[in-house]
Image (cartoon, helix red, strand yellow):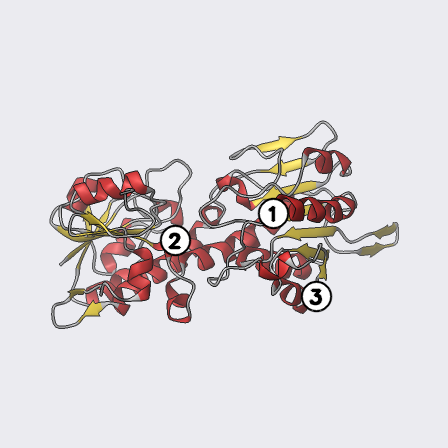
Amino acid sequence: MRVAVLKERRSGETRVAATPETVKKYVGLGLEVAVESGAGLASGIIDAAYAEAGATIAADAAGALAGAGIVLVVRAPEAELPRGALLIGTLGADAAAAAAYAAAGVDACSMELLPRITRAQSMDVLSSQANLAGYRAVIEGAGAYDKGFPMMMTAAGTVPAANVFIMGAGVAGLQAIATARRLGGRVSATDVRPAAKEEIKSLGATFVGYEDEESKAAQTAGGYAKQLSAEFYAKQAEVVAAHIAKQDVVVCTALVQGRKAPTLVTEAMVASMKPGSVIVDIAADAGGNCAATKPGELVVTANGVKILGFTNWPGRLPAASSALYARNLLTFLTTFWDKEAKAPKLPEEDDIVKGVALTRCGAVVHPLMKPAA
């Protein structure tokens, strides 16, 4: 069976779905691997490295896809896929896209829909990529902030430590807390989920937030934050507004699965911040947590606050993010690998498969993607 690894064509996408490490393991499973020429260049991987690992280098997407039974991507591909192929990636699919895959006879698996269960941890693309995004956000924030993070005592005087506020304590937020602490910042954090308070404190940060009966049920069974009432967000905003005015760097990481990112930093909050302060909005891809964020742009407000609204934060660390993402996909395939048939076997009743499978045998099978009756 042939595995095709395509070059990403979406603007700003620097990652690749396979590395020489994973190619070697696919070849060990008895697969033929075809990598589109230049697929790994943005991640620092040259064609020769793939060839040395056992891959065939195809001149273009059509060449890589010819006869392919499995197609590995980071984002939804634009190329026409072979009928009957298994497509695996973070497809960001909606009902229309799922219907298109079904009509094309492609069995599509969208890895961002993976359920957060113990068995799936090693193939969880959202966690692996969010971890790197949280780290990179703090590094970018430190670069944009013009005073430095740690307290520095010199003969000329003392430079105080930066006040760093992390909004959202999921995977990205916790990594952001740890990174900001390592850089010497005075770190505080907030999250609506009840379990997050202890996690924040365990990393040495101060918890900031409003708590009531509603916040006790602010987490889904899968570990994601729930959408809460407007009244709760208003009370949370009062607590945050008083705190945020004193901060030097704010890192926004709050996401609600399948919905626009909640607005946590209002225009008024931005106006209250000191000149030279920095807001780093990891949630820019989903609309942003800051009301003044412009996705894909660096904004400097009238009062001198810098807002970093870059998109695809994992793609700002392409070598590391590609390495982890490629291992996630390899783990998914090997978990459902039929050694005798030398092909993947995705049991319909398996919880992981039910979570990620969009289409099968020309039909839409994911409950969230099926057309209304």
User: Which of the two discs, 1 and 3, labels the residue nearer the N terminus?
Assistant: 3
The secondary element bearing badge 2 is classed as helix
Q: What amino acid is found at the position of numbered circle 1 in the picture?
A: Ser
Q: Residues within 10 Å of mark 3 (few under 14, many from 20)?
A: some
Mark 2 → mark 1, Cα distance in angstroms:
26 Å
Q: In percent of the image, x 19 and y 39: which residue is there?
A: 80
User: Which of the two discs, 2 and 1, labels the residue nearer the N terminus?
Assistant: 2
Mark 2 → mark 3, Cα distance in angstroms:
30 Å
The circle on residue 204 is 3
Residue receiving disc 1: 229
Q: Is there any visible trace of residue 313 in the rendered image?
A: yes
The secondary element bearing badge 1 is classed as loop
Residue 122 image point, x, y percent:
39, 67
Q: In percent of the image, x 88 and y 49: which residue is there?
A: 156
Side (left or right) of 325 relative to 137: left
State which mark lies toward you, 1 or 3. Answer: 1
Residue receiving disc 2: 112
Mark 1 → mark 3, Cα distance in angstroms:
30 Å
> Which quarter of the figure is the N terminus placed in?
bottom left
